[in-house]
Image (tube, grey):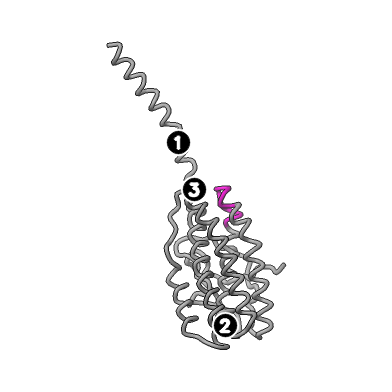
Amino acid sequence: MLGIKRLGLLAALVLVGIAPAAAAQAAVQPSQQDTQYLQALHQVNLFEITAGDLAQQKGQNQGVKDLGDRFRTDHTQLDQTVQQTASQLGVQLPAEPTADQQSVLDQLNNASGEEFDRLWVTSELAGHVQAIQATQTEISQGSDQTVVQLAQTALPTLQAHYDALVQLAEQLGIPVPQASGTATPSPGGTTPAPGGTTGTPAPGGTTESPAPGGTTTETPAPTQS
């Protein structure tokens, strides 16, 4: 009987030890906002790394080549942090860009010369606007401090990229989409496609672009620093 009581006591102690651990594990589960932001930013990075390679290979303008190299380096470094954070939080990341992002990469693969440069700059402008919007949303609405801090670190880099793109667009005579609203969409549902094939601002004027949430909204351009 004494042995049975001891076994019962040990079992109780084990359960007492497991319960707080299980509760702690449940408490650190990232929110949908945090999860979708990590996934969206990872796909942005995948897109930017590949697009940067293409700019190096096919860019006619030296500014396109230089920015492509810069974007590839910055987004590779950023994605290392994204992957580390996702691993810590148990978030599964997509293995490839979105269908819209891949469509843009296909268009870039099929373009050359000045056409390539203009398409690259235009798609990069649209993509960075959406990435900045999603990052601003994570900073204001995210619940996991690790992910929020990641967004805070990413924002200056994304903004610097956008500002450099604006300068290059002006040099090449490519119209830059003007701010037409103040809403900051939240990533959710489908992932934003940098330079997506639907509603991407095209040279010659501004259009609506898909927000990081699968819905369509007017694209506000970030404030230049």
Dot 3 corresponds to which residue?
88
Q: Secondary structure at mark 2?
A: loop
Which residues are the magenta region? 138-148
Proximity of marks 2 and 3: CB atoms separated by less than 8 Å: no
Q: Nearer the viewer, residue 223 or 159?
A: 159
Between marks 2 and 1 in the image, the one whose residue lies nearer the viewer: 2
Tell me what residue is drawn at x 50 percent, y 62 percent.
42
Give coordinates of residue 87: x percent, y percent.
Answer: 47, 51
Amino acid residing under circle 3: Gln
- Left or right of residue 55, residue 12 in this image: left
Between marks 2 and 3 in the image, the one whose residue lies nearer the viewer: 2
Q: Nearer the viewer, residue 131 or 140?
A: 131
Dot 2 corresponds to which residue?
59
Disc marking residue 206: none
Proximity of marks 3 and 1: CB atoms separated by less than 8 Å: no
Amino acid residing under circle 1: Ala
Q: Is the residue 221 above or below the residue 41 in the image?
A: below
**Real-space Cα distance between discs 3 and 1?**
17 Å
Q: Main secondary structure of the magenta part?
A: helix
Give coordinates of residue 192: x percent, y percent.
Answer: 50, 67
Q: Quadrant of residue 4?
A: top left
Between marks 3 and 1 in the image, the one whose residue lies nearer the viewer: 3
Crowding near the residue tagged with mark 1, few <14, some 14–19, many ≥20 C-alpha atoms within 10 Å: few
**On-image quarter of the N terminus:** top left
Q: Is residue 182 magenta?
A: no
Dot 1 corresponds to which residue?
23
Amino acid residing under circle 2: Gly
Q: Which sits earlier in the primary sequence, circle 3 or circle 1?
A: 1
Q: Which sits earlier in the primary sequence, circle 2 or circle 1?
A: 1
Q: Secondary structure at mark 1?
A: helix
Tell me what residue is drawn at x 42 percent, y 71 percent.
99
